[in-house]
Amino acid sequence: MEEEEARAPLLQPQPQPRGDKAGRARRAAAEWWVESKKLWQIVGPAIFQRIALYGINVVSQAFIGHLGDLELAAFSIAATVVAGFNFGFLLGMASALETLCGQAFGAKKHHMLGVYLQRSWIVLLLFAAALTPTYIFMEDLLLLIGQSPELSRLAGQMSVWLIPQHFAMAMLLPLTRFLQSQLKNWVTAYTAGAALAVHVAVTYVLVHHLHFGIVGAIAAADMSWWLVVLGQFVYVVGGGCPLSWKGFSMEAFTDFWEFIKLSSASGVMLCLENWYYRLLVLLTGYLKNAEIAVDALSICQTINGWEMMIPFGFLAATGVRVANELGAGSGKGARFAIVVSITTSVVIGLVFWCLILYFNDQIALLFTSSRVVLAEVHNLSVLLAFTILLNSVQPVLSGVAVGSGWQALVAYVNIGTYYLIGVPLGMVLGWPLHFGVGGIWSGMIGGTAVQTLILAYLTVKCDWDEEAKVASMRMQKWAESK
């Protein structure tokens, strides 16, 4: 008997229980379901909050758009060139909190979350103050880069009224990330939803009944942003986060330089992304019939921006989930969270790709009744659809970078792909080859595609177990410093 066993081939296939494959499939489906629930605990409220906050400015834009084409173009320029650029930088700086708070929460270092929040407030308010002159001298900046005097004057007037919103962002962005990293996402959703409801009513009264026009629409938006800040601030300091908020502390000023470096890297990384398509509106201002082109493009970008709140929700959720898993020392968990997030986001992106192609320019009726502008939106709808599809992947990969602390590396990737490939290619297609706004947009889509491929390569090739060790060492270093 022993001789027969010895002669038996070692690689002889062994009979498998019939239920093994089905069992593995059930286990895989169960793991996917568990991760999806964790993801959507963050994604759902994050998407709702972003849509509500974005909706505040969309409501203002819709009211202003029906005042006239020049008013719509001026608001688009003001919201894009100054408010949009500065928002992108502050948003990026606040994303450092996703890395640090997410990993601290995963490692159960709850007290450190409150310290990180206070550091972020200090840093963002300092940078917000430094950026304020860009609002004051908006008209001069636009004239310097060759925009028309009439458009520059009106946009300059609007930009001054956006300053209160600027400082509200510096307070709100750290608060939101502080709460999201602890899965207290319902707070961010409720406060944003309530502010949007108030904003619609107040804007209607100020613009239509009191006839304050543009100033009324922007002032209502400023008030609504500060309502969101107040709601989240009261929740945090009023006892809603007993483990992570222990009151104001001088610890916020320790390791300040290291925090500024990570925040600055985060700011550069995400603001380069945020500025990229906003730059498209600015470049379009140099084309013939610029007013119509800017109006059509700003409507397309508003639609794209509204849909982008979904991928941005996945960006936030991916950053939190990856940071939590790395902080807990689980490289495998981080890898699986990335797969689930990207797959889900792409499926949603395909749905919106089909919707944009089907409904075409009909959504633009929300913003204008001009036949010329509607026709231009119709011509750009295919580019809008493919931008939405591509953006279902790219922000999620940026979330991976945020959760892992790769901000400095990705900043270099963004500079190369966006500003050394996308912008020059768009300018060549737009002017020498005479494809106009469609050519500029097509070239910039090419830059985004290259950036997405590079980030996908970095994600696939990453040793996630090693990343988990790095995160654990960071938390250990903090514990030893205490």
Image (cartoon, helix red, strand yellow):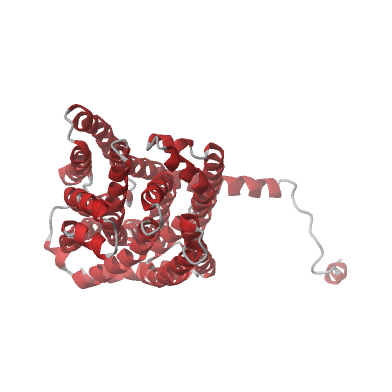
The residue closer to the viewer here, 431 or 199, is 431
In the image, is residue 442 above or below residue 218?
Answer: below
Which part of the image, by quadrant, shows the C terminus? bottom left
> Residue 245's x, y, as percent?
19, 51
Residue 54, by quadrant, is: top left
Point 79% across, 58% down: residue = 14
In the image, is residue 307 above or below residue 16?
Answer: above
> Residue 342's x, y, as percent?
51, 53
> Residue 261's x, y, as percent?
26, 71
Q: Is residue 439 visible?
A: yes
Residue 136, by quadrant, is: bottom left
The residue closer to the viewer here, 80 or 468, is 80
Point 34% across, 47% down: residue = 183
Residue 7, by quadrant, is: bottom right
In the image: residue 301, left or right of residue 128: right
In the image: residue 476, left or right of residue 136: right
Q: How many marks?
A: 0
In the image, is residue 243 above or below residue 368?
Answer: below
Which part of the image, by quadrant, shows the N terminus? bottom right
In the image: residue 441, left or right of residue 137: right
In the image: residue 234, left or right of residue 53: left
The residue closer to the viewer here, 297 or 197, is 297
The residue closer to the viewer here, 396 or 319, is 396
Q: Is residue 328 visible?
A: no
